Amino acid sequence: MNIRSGAELTADHEVECDVCIVGSGAGGAVLAAGLSARGLKVVMLEEGAYRTSDDFRALSERVNTPMLYQERGTRSTSDVAITILQGRTVGGSTTVNWTTCFRTPERILSHWGAHMGLDALAPGSLDAHFAAVEERLHIQPWQEELVNANNAALARGCEALGWEAHVLRRNVKGCANSGFCGFGCPFDAKQAMHLTFLPDAVKAGMELWSCMRAERIEVAGDRAVAVHAVAMERDRDRTGVARLTVRPKVVAVCGGAINSPALLMRSSIDHGPLGRRTFLHPVIAVPGEYSEQIDPFYGAPQSVSSHHHIDRGADRMGFFLEAAPLHPMLTGSAMPIFGARAAKEMAVLPHLSGLIALHVDGLLPGDDGGTVRLRSDGRIAVDYPVKPWLQEAMTASHAALARVHLAAGAKRVFTMHQQPTELWSPSDLPKLAEARYGAHAHAIFSAHQMGGCAMHADAAKGVVDVEHRHHRVPNLFVVDGSVLPTALGVNPSQTIYGLAHRARGFVADAAS
Ligand SMILES: Cc1cc2nc3c(=O)[nH]c(=O)nc-3n(C[C@H](O)[C@H](O)[C@H](O)COP(=O)(O)OP(=O)(O)OC[C@H]3O[C@@H](n4cnc5c(N)ncnc54)[C@H](O)[C@@H]3O)c2cc1C
Ligand code: SF4
């Protein structure tokens, strides 16, 4: 793919275009392909570098994590209670994601209609968009016989308990079942954006800049008139020497949740609940040790999901269960234990299965999730207090995952507390009630960031309208996970692809 790199830019540069897109991930790439196919001149800015399977073949967590993730893999909430995994490379988080694909659940779309005035997104309204991206990204059910032992433990445990569980759909073609999705697919099997919608857009004439960070959007009156960007060094999170100024008719912000609201804040476009209602699908993990070899680092990372606990009633937060790949560095850094204890657990890594629970934030009345803000030096901070309802759900989800492992035949289950609770049989389950749950009590993660530029029909309650148009700056659009007004209860990539596919028409009309 023909890409320009800010790292090689030696002098300041200026360009005019129809649409400037900031960010090359799930939202930006799908939008770009549609606009470029319509003959619009598109300039895309991506702060991360362009990496391909040639880079990914190193198969090194140590090398690939800082290369492909925001803040070199160290992003977290400001109190360091929640580790935040988010991509930063051409293709965004789709380059490192685990390929699970779900259409947006109907109950979520109905909730948005009832509470956010988003009736235009009623169940069924996105079907044609979902079908189009399913075809381009080869989204298909994973073969049951290829489910790895890590995910099979989830399926087996749920079946024994009588809980719903099913095999997932994945955006892959010719997948070698290797297990390295999180470090970039070394086989070009994952149909990530750098292999699909971005080459489509570049072939149709888009100018794509890697290593180019949008710092500020200039607004004159109620019009976005320029995007001011700074070149980045290729291998470090450090700005280079040259600057790029883009003068577009329309700006589309697609930097993902957290970075998109931060860009609008830096640009002083602070309308509505900007940065607020940031959702993380907060994740807890419970490993189980099995007699047989699990090798939780090999095989498609996610292929089974259980939604048995997704609806726990009107006043309790729901959660869903999946598996996570246990690569050595990821596992070692995630477990809040040290020394001999950590060495003991790492020694049995091939026999561990890592099951996770993802909590659905933003649906309960009063659950505003977290907040993105800028620190005094301009860096991003994410505040995410663990509220009582999340604490209650985490207590329940620890017990649910322990029950799954024991029903699946685990000989030992342990929690990710600093003083782990260990269980050997169902009679040990009451021990879980003695533990503390919430921030700093045990490990918490997020790989699904949503919200911060919430979509809402009411201009006072949202940052963008149902057509992704900014409520105060009509030639500014936000097309990424930051517009989601609540978490989804499913992995978010396909919702973002579908929404971006729908947004193409609105952005094109504004630029024509
Ligand atoms: C490890 C991991 C596993 C995941 N697994 C799954 C999964 O299996 N299924 C699923 O559905 N979802 C998964 N996700 C989440 C999913 O990939 C994301 O929700 C989705 O890609 C978000 O799309 P986006 O367009 O909002 O942002 P992104 O895809 O993150 O893209 C945003 C891009 O914008 C760039 N950017 C940001 N700010 C600027 C700026 N100022 N200037 C220039 N560029 C900028 C970023 O560098 C980034 O490349 C996973 C995520 C991670 C990290
Ligand atoms: S599991 Fe499949 S999609 Fe993931 S890295 Fe391996 S070959 Fe690529």
Image (tube, rainbow, N blue to C red):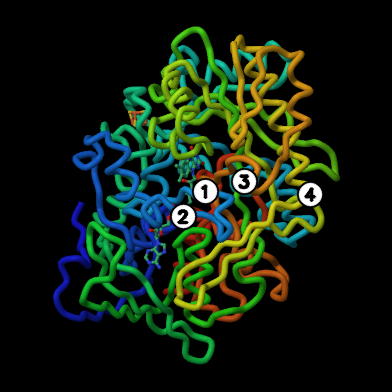
Seen from the viewer's position, the closer of residues 461 and 390 is: 390
> Mark 1 or 3 closer to N-term?
1
> Mark 3 or 2 closer to N-term?
2
Residue 213, image x, y percentages: 34, 69
**Marker disc for residue 422:** none
**Marker disc for residue 75:** 2
Label 2: few (<14), some (14–19) or many (≥20) C-alpha neighbours in 10 Å: some
Residue at the disc numbered 1: 83
Seen from the viewer's position, the closer of residues 433 and 109 is: 433
- The residue lying at 48 percent from left, 8 percent from top is 292
Residue 257, image x, y percentages: 53, 59
| Secondary structure of the residue carrying numbered label 2 | loop
Give the CA separation, mark 1 to mark 2.
Answer: 6 Å
Tag 2: residue type? Arg
Tag 4: residue type? Pro
Give the CA separation, mark 2 to mark 4.
Answer: 24 Å
Quarter of the displayed picture in which ligand 2 can be seen: top left
Quadrant in which residue 331 is drawn:
top left
- Report whether 274 appears left or right of 216: right
In the rendered view, would you say 247 is above or below 308? below
State how many labels appear.
Answer: 4
| Secondary structure of the residue carrying numbered label 1 | strand
| Secondary structure of the residue carrying numbered label 4 | helix
